[in-house]
Amino acid sequence: MNRMDLLKKIKKRKESLGLTIDNIAKLTKLGNRTVARFFAGDDVKLSTFEKITNVLGLDFAGNEIKDIETLKKERAREKALFIVSLVQDTSSLEKQGLDSRKLELLIKDTQEQFLTGKYKKHLWTN
């Protein structure tokens, strides 16, 4: 596989996930210009290539390491944990924290909202 074929494969994966250059830049902690240069086919550092393919669930050859559904579920869980932790921390300060069973239910509900509910369009945003 040549370089352009690999880039096409990576671009297709990006589109399948519904990611933007801005999303990828934030998730990889790379600059927007760096990510844009990568997708334009310009030369980039190997570490940049690795960060971008990792976020997309691909290896260096463009092979799938994680399927799209797994990537989405992991991202939704990560975001749900973050949001629920903010609520839990605030509630704990007010001595109204949730027990572990209720907390896990809240995490699962929030995760589902990122996958199929009203927060779906915010799955990849930071």
Image: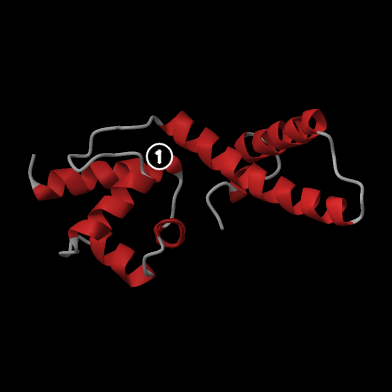
x, y percentage for residue 67?
Answer: 39, 29
Question: In this orientation, which residue lies closer to the viewer: 40 or 105?
Answer: 105
- Quarter of the N terminus within the rendering: top left
Compared to residue 121, the image places residue 46 above or below, namely: below
Residue occupying the point 33% across, 45% down: 54
x, y percentage for residue 58?
Answer: 29, 39
Extreme-right residue of the structure: 95
Residue occupying the point 34% across, 41% down: 13
> Residue 101 occupies which quadrant of the picture?
top right
User: Mark 1: which secondary structure?
Assistant: helix
> Residue 78 occupies which quadrant of the picture?
top right
Residue occupying the point 86% across, 56% down: 93
Q: Amino acid at mark 1?
A: Ser
Q: Position of 46 compared to 107: left or right?
A: left
Residue occupying the point 73% across, 46% down: 84
Question: In this orientation, which residue lies closer to the viewer: 19 or 87?
Answer: 87
Say few, some or many: other residues with alpha carbon within 10 Å of mark 1 (under 14 / 14 to 19 / 20 or more). few
Q: Position of 39 compared to 111: left or right?
A: left
Q: Position of 82 compared to 106: left or right?
A: left
Question: In this orientation, which residue lies closer to the viewer: 88 or 63?
Answer: 88
Question: In this orientation, which residue lies closer to the viewer: 106 or 122?
Answer: 106
> Residue 119 occupies which quadrant of the picture?
top right
x, y percentage for residue 42?
Answer: 17, 64
- Quarter of the C terminus within the rendering: bottom right
Compared to residue 7, the image places residue 115 above or below, namely: above
Instruction: Please name the colour scheme applied to the rendered image.
Output: secondary structure
Compared to residue 121, the image places residue 100 above or below, namely: above
Q: Position of 25 compared to 86: left or right?
A: left
Q: Which residue is mark 1?
A: 16
x, y percentage for residue 40?
Answer: 23, 62
